[in-house]
Amino acid sequence: MAGTLRKKEIISWCLFDFANSTYAAVIAAVVFPVYYSTYIVTDGSGDLWWGRAVSLSMLIVAIASPVLGGIADYTGLRKRFLFFFTALCILSVSALSGLDRGMALEGFLLIVLANIGMEGGLVFYNSFLNRIAPSGYRGRVSAWGYGVGYAGSVVSLVAVLPLARTGRFGLSWIIVAMLFMVFSLPAFIFLPGDKRAGGLISSSMKGIRYTISSLREMLSVRNTRRFLLAYFLYADGVNTVIVFSGIYAARTLGFTTAELVILYITVQVSALSGAFSMAGLTDKWGHKKVVLLSLVVWAGVCVASSIAGSKDAFWVIAVTAGLGLGTVQAASRSLYAGLVPAGKESEYFGVYALAGKTSSVIGPLIFGYLSSTLGSQRPAVLAIGALFVAGMAVLSGVGEGAGTR
């Protein structure tokens, strides 16, 4: 395997995953969704409000990501963009502490801003993978990042558990913001610095034109186009399950907030185990094969969740989902990294974000609509399983490596 490991950069890159996972766990997945949909929203339309907030923020990121990615590649300002979006997320999360019962619109706006900050930053965070890891190590470095991220989820959930039990939710959001800030700092210190290529405005305009041209170019490559379609489908399933899993467990199966936190901690431990256990095997077996195996697991999880009749059964399902979560995310990222030409990392990962975040616009809307229309969340989660099957079908025709067409 060619190339040497840049350990300081890799460690700081992984710690950023630790940082943003505190938001992903507490705000996006477990505690805040239930708090917002049941306490802040008082008229019983919590699923719809939450689904709309997630969808709107993802739509904005989806539209902006390819353009911002191209600008970052052309201007050399990846790190500054990463800092801007990270700061936006941290400040918005801090502001959540001022919410009170009935402030549905204020909560909606803040979560939209926080999600834009979180998801927008991931475009630039992901683009550093090719710069810090040799090609033969990208699969495991990607998995290490997700593994450290799951540790961040566990730490943040343990920190807010006693607060959730005593109803001190405002302080929980402050703790998440502080953890995000502290553990993101190494990335801004040690990751490769920006290389300014010219004036921001002129370079940005050139970057937009460059992005449009390059977008046409990458979508003309059958292999890249097919992967992005597959990723669009199964990322839809993954993201929708993540943002609605806590609400589903609370409303359909009767989990309390404290039980949800403990469940999600266990899931993060299983996800961490899955990510690290498959790290070396991803490079050995091939990224595509590992992604396909993970999607089989996820499709089964959706079917099992739709018929689960007890908390104990859902515990088993959730832990199984965790094992496949880290694997599918890490292997997808490293599979795609292998398709990216040198020098176009931010731009390509902008389109990668476009595929993933656009799917996150559709999935939550589908889940919220089916849940509200049918009066049950079970058909909604079953419908999500079809996305994994469709993703597998499309991904089966994708070849690995930048040279494949």
Image (spheres, rainbow, N blue to C red):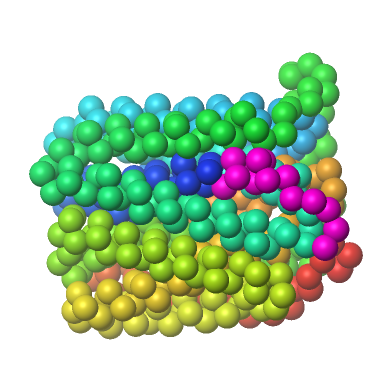
| Residue 378 image offset from top left, x and y in percent | 28, 74
Task: Please provide percent x and percent y for residue 241.
Answer: 40, 64
**Who's the residue at 47% across and 43% down the image?**
20
Percent position (x, y) of residue 48? 30, 52
The residue at 60%/45% (across/down) is 11
Location of residue 384 in the rendering, given as x and y in whole percent from the top left corner: 43, 71
Relative to the observer, which residue lies in front, 59 or 290?
290
Question: What residue is drawn where x is 78% and y is 40%?
Answer: 211
Instruction: Note whether 382 is above or below 335 in the view shown.
Output: below
Residue 10 lies in the magenta-colored region: yes
Label total for image: 0
Q: Residue at x 65, y 74 (%)?
A: 281
Span colored in magenta: 1-14
58 to the left or right of 160: right
Q: Which image quadrant for residue 320? A: bottom left
Quarter of the image for the C terminus: give it: bottom right
- Rendered view: 249 above or below 130: below
**Residue 81 visible in the shown view:** no
Quarter of the rendering containing residue 141: bottom right
**Residue 301 at least partly seen:** yes
182 is higher (above) or lower (below) than 228: above
Pick whichever, 237 or 264, lies toward us.
264
Determine if the magenta segment contains residue 211: no
Outermost residue, right side: 403
The residue closer to the viewer here, 184 or 4, is 4
Left or right of 251? Residue 213 is right
In the image, taking residue 102 as reference, residue 80 lies left or right, namely right
